[in-house]
Amino acid sequence: MKITLAIATDIPLLQKLAEESWRANYRDILSDGQIEYMLRMMYSRDELQKHFDQAKYCYHLIWDGEMAVGFIGFEHDYEPQTTKLHRIYLLQECKGRGLGRFALKFLEETVRNYGNRRIILNVNKENPAREFYSSRGYLVYDEGVFDIGNGFVMDDVLMEKFV
C-alpha cells in the first residue's frame, strides 16, 4: 500500500478510476442518468485541470502493489482551519483490504502537517461509506439536498472530524 501525489498527466487515470468505481459503487444509490451526468460534470478533463491549477487542491493515487486502485482528492483551507475531503474512491474489488483506512490516516496526517484542524466531507445518505466514516471517528454535523443541475440533486449528510 502506498499513496503518491497525482499530477495533471494522471487525469486520464483519475477519470478511469472514477468511472469504474462510480459504476460499481453507486449503481444501487443513483440512477444511470445521474451517474453519467455527475461523471461528465465532475471528472471532465477541464474540471480536473481546474483542480490541479489550485495550489490547495490535491489529488493522490492509492496503490495496491504496482496497481493504482483509487484516489483521494481534498482541498486545504476550504473553510478556516478546515480541509474538505472532496473525493475518495476505490475500485470495488479492492474494498475491505484496509486501503480506505490507510487513505484516511494519510489524509489526517497531511491535514495536521498542513496546519488545518478539521476535515469535512459530504456523503450520500444511502452510501454505505457513511458507516465507514463513522467508524473512523467522523460525526454528522448537518445534512443537505444540493441541486447539481439537469434535474438532479445530491442528498447528503455532512460529516466532520477534528484532527
Image (cartoon, grey):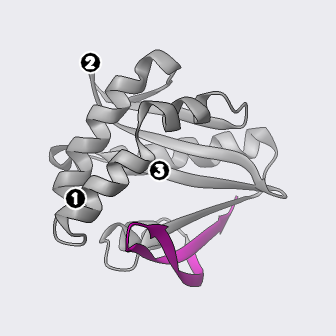
- Percent coordinates x, y for residue 73 in the rendering: 52, 42
116 vs 2: above or below: below
Please state which amino acid type lies under the numbered disc 1.
Answer: Asn
- Percent coordinates x, y for residue 51 in the rendering: 59, 36
Query: How many angstroms separate mark 1 from mark 2 (CA)?
Result: 23 Å
Q: Residue 116 vs residue 5: left or right?
A: right
Callout 3: SS: strand
Count of numbered labels shown in the rendering = 3
Q: In the image, what residue occupies the spot 78% across and 51% down?
A: 116
Residue 51 bears which disc, if any?
none
Sequence-wise, the earlier of marks 1 and 2 is 1
Q: Residue 122 vs residue 71: left or right?
A: right
Extreme-front residue of the structure: 150
| Residue labelled with disc 2 | 66
| Picture quarter with the C terminus | bottom right
Please state which amino acid type lies under the numbered disc 3.
Answer: Arg
Within 10 Å of disc 2 (Cα), the crowding (few <14, some 14-19, many 20+) is few
Query: How many angstroms separate mark 3 from mark 2 (CA)?
Result: 22 Å
58 vs 162, nearest the viewer: 58
Callout 1: SS: helix
Within 10 Å of disc 3 (Cα), the crowding (few <14, some 14-19, many 20+) is some
Sequence-wise, the earlier of marks 3 and 2 is 2
Task: Determine which quarter of the picture holds residue 125.
Answer: bottom left
| Residue labelled with disc 1 | 25
The magenta segment = 139-163
Please state which amino acid type lies under the numbered disc 2.
Answer: Glu
Query: How many angstroms separate mark 1 from mark 3 (CA)?
Result: 13 Å
Q: In the image, what residue occupies the spot 42% across and 49% down?
A: 41
